[in-house]
Amino acid sequence: MSLTPRKPIAGSFLGLAALVSVGVAAPAAFAEPAPGQPAIGMPAPVDQWSTRLDEVSPPGVDARRLFADLGNDQGKVTIAKAEILAGRLPILSVKIPNNDWAGAAAGKYDALYIDLANRLQALPGKTVLVVHHEPIGDGSPADFVAMQVHLMPLARPLSNVIVGVILNGFMWSARAQGYSDAEIEAWAPLRLRQAVEVLAADTYHGGTMEDPGEDAGVKIARMSAWADRKGYVKPLGIGEFNGLTAAAITNACNAMFADPRFMFGNVFNSNENNREGIEWVLTGARLTAFKSCVTASRQ
């Protein structure tokens, strides 16, 4: 299956060119996508990043997912600055101490959150800031939503900080684990959709290498359809995705390319947190498919 590049959308808010103003010339290997194209990137542990980046270069990537704990995040802010200067969009996911969502909603962590937002604002370009990605199983949807709608307005006045959420992608599965619109509404109600600047999800290929299940492209397409039903017109994103086959990676990329709302999509290219029967590190045909995805995103 071939990749389908999406043509630029004139005046779009979504493209990395419209999102990242770094003040220096980006390296040629990391040319910014045209407006209206998603920034295709990846997360990888700090000690693996150079290796993973070398493996996908050329063409390289246009975004990098980062993880930190709120209040213990200075190192990742430093990395975010380096990524901006390299022409990539940092997407920083932070966790609240002890998953204290109720405390966050009550203002307990405002000082830490505002301090982080101000440090990101001082960087030479945009950073996406997310609090507690993939929340299902870590607390109640009511506390999650209350935390988000309290915290995000504190950072929204800052021009270099794009606030959003990254939900569990399995909610949009076409299989038994998929959620109904009413169930999704508990985690992404109107007041949260109004507060975010980008609404994203982590979507993966189910099954194992020997017996693949539903691929991420199905979930991404169903997420787009859900956004249509809800009248959601702001940016979408894919915090993480991966496929167990080259075709599955292509399907995921084409699902993003089919919807001009997608701001970014990051392949999980790491040997950490791999479940049994899975190897998420890209090699062979899967690596080639991902490289083609990056190239297509820039056309």
Image: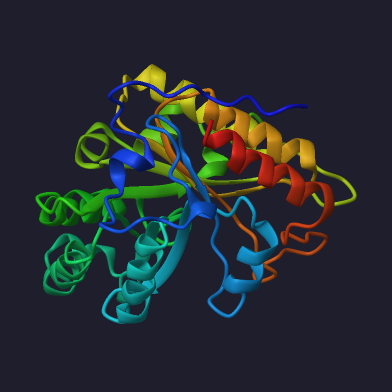
The residue located at (78%, 27%) in the rendering is 1
The residue located at (20%, 36%) in the rendering is 191
The correct choice, above or below, for 69 with respect to 61 in the image is below
Q: Position of residue 90 (x, y in %)?
A: 39, 59
Q: Position of residue 187 (x, y in %)?
A: 36, 42
Which quadrant of the view contains residue 132? bottom left
Q: Pick whichever, 235 or 4, lies toward us.
A: 4
The correct choice, above or below, for 216 with respect to 74 in the image is above
The reply, left or right, for residue 178 in relation to residue 190 is: right
* Residue 84 visible in image: yes
Q: Position of residue 174 (x, y in %)?
A: 64, 29
The reply, left or right, for residue 128 in relation to residue 299 is: left
Which quadrant of the view contains residue 272? bottom right
* Residue 173 visible in image: no
The reply, left or right, for residue 245 in relation to residue 134 is: right
The correct choice, above or below, for 294 with respect to 143 in the image is above
Report the number of discs: 0
Which quadrant of the view contains residue 96? bottom left
The residue located at (52%, 39%) in the rendering is 171
Q: Position of residue 31 (x, y in %)?
A: 47, 47
